[in-house]
Image (cartoon, rainbow, N blue to C red):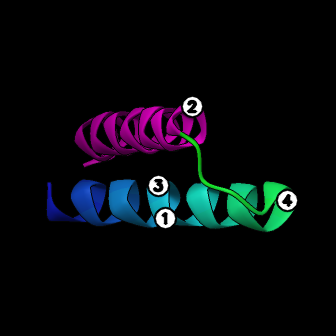
Amino acid sequence: MTEAIILTIAVFLGWLLLDFVKTKAVTKEVFIQSAFVGVVAGIIWYFLGLILS
């Protein structure tokens, strides 16, 4: 579970950073998209961990 949370935060921050570099601004839309992608990645990672362990 801890790995999934760490991955969620890392993906969120990475996606946010990439969008910031590309657009030079952080809008509400970019923030929500980054959060969504991070949460989806964390959920997928968590379930993969359950399946593979």
Amino acid at circle 3: Phe
Which is more toward the observer, 39 or 24?
A: 24
Residue, disc 4: 22
Residue 20 occupies which quadrant of the picture?
Answer: bottom right
Give how far apart the Cα atoms at labels 2 and 3 are: 13 Å
Report the residue at 60% width, 53% height from top.
26
Residue, disc 1: 13
Contact check, label 4 and label 3, Cβ < 8 Å = no
Contact check, label 3 and label 1, Cβ < 8 Å = yes
Q: Specify whether residue 18 is painted magenta.
A: no
Q: Which of marks 2 and 3 is nearer the N terminus?
A: 3
Q: Is mark 3 on a helix, strand or loop?
A: helix
Give how far apart the Cα atoms at labels 1 and 2 are: 15 Å
Which of the two discs, 4 and 3, sits closer to the camera? Answer: 4
Give how far apart the Cα atoms at labels 2 and 4 are: 14 Å
Q: Is mark 1 on a helix, strand or loop?
A: helix
Q: Specify whether residue 33 is painted magenta.
A: yes
Residue, disc 2: 29
Q: What element carries label 2?
A: helix
Amino acid at circle 4: Lys
Which of the two discs, 2 and 3, sits closer to the camera? Answer: 2
Q: Earlier in the sequence, mark 2 or mark 4?
A: 4
Q: Earlier in the sequence, mark 1 or mark 2?
A: 1
Give how far apart the Cα atoms at labels 4 and 3 are: 15 Å
- Residue range highlighted in magenta: 28-53
